[in-house]
Image (cartoon, rainbow, N blue to C red):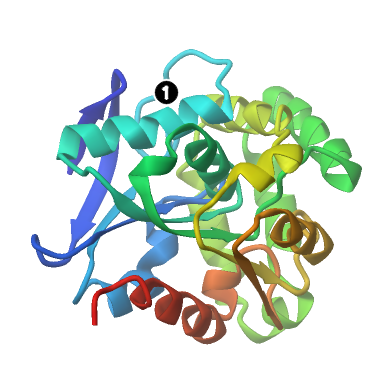
Amino acid sequence: MQVSANGINFVCQIDGPESAPWLTFSNSLNTNFSLWDEQVALLSDRYRVLRYNTRGHDGTGTPPGPWSLEDLASDIIALWDELGIAKSHFVGLSIGGMTGQALALGWPDRISAYVLADTRADFTGEFAQTVPALIDKVVAEGLDPLVAVMPLRWFAEEVRAARPELVERARQLIATNTVEGYVACAGAMTRLDYMDRLHKIEHRTLLICGAQDIGTPPDGMREMAKRIPNATYVEIDPAGHLSNIENPVAFNAALIPFLDSFQAP
């Protein structure tokens, strides 16, 4: 389905009973909402699940850049407003988690359960060197450099060896992106600077990280968990950057009880 919000046509999917609590998933860069298939299969019996393709990804509109993470968060608010969603649980991975930080800091009253996975709160270290270089390569060469490098950055070596089909799935997901969408979203990440504001997030929060994630590594997420007052940190091993599809059993074992704990007995 398509939903017009914030002046953009979003490709969305809604599953689950109309009377159930809302649950919103926000994707990683270079993916689409199919990223969450294995979670939605287990949750759509008791949650009204909203998934959407980020601006510039797989059929969703691409307004002129540059964009900010606050822009991406305002897209979620606009979607919720358009769909009549007063409040929703939120799960975001990678740039979805960065967007989630902007969401929690800017619109805290719109979120119930709050989950950040394989994400970070600052633009430092290896990440700060890699992202600008990839932006330059994509501008010059198109999406082919991402097809070559991202599966190596996304997946733990052990997982790549055991499940080569994930590498092919990653390549297919990258192909749904646009150059303009990648450049503008990655550009938003270069202005990521929430670490010193995380103490303002009052929601009960679950942070999940793949033990072999090199882009948003465990050390950074453990630091985030220290700074968010009511946070729980779970590390998934083996898993890299897309821990929800690399090790869905362990990911779901952390996610589902946390979400369900917000429901009335």
Please tell me how crowded label 1 is: few (under 14), some (14-19), or many (20+) other residues with Cα within 10 Å: some
Q: State whether residue 160 is above or below residue 147.
A: below
Closer-to-camera residue (256/161): 256
Q: Which residue sits at x=76%, y=39%?
A: 196
Query: Is 256 left or right of 48, judged from the image as shown?
Result: right
Q: Which residue sits at x=67%, y=45%?
A: 198
Is residue 115 shown to the viewer in this render?
yes
Q: Position of residue 52 (x, y in %)?
A: 33, 46
- Residue lying furthest left in this view? 18
Query: Is 108 left or right of 262, judged from the image as shown?
Result: right
Q: Position of residue 93 (x, y in %)?
A: 55, 55
Q: Position of residue 98 (x, y in %)?
A: 60, 43
Residue kind at label 1, given as amino acid type: Thr
Q: State whether residue 110 is above or below residue 47.
A: above
**The C terminus, quarter of image:** bottom left
Query: Is 46 left or right of 96, judged from the image as shown?
Result: left
Q: State whether residue 12 is above or below residue 246.
A: above
Determine which residue is flagged by label 1: 62
Closer-to-camera residue (12/177): 12
Q: Which residue sits at x=16%, y=66%?
A: 16
Name the quadrant containing residue 211. Answer: bottom right
Q: Which residue sits at x=35%, y=70%?
A: 262
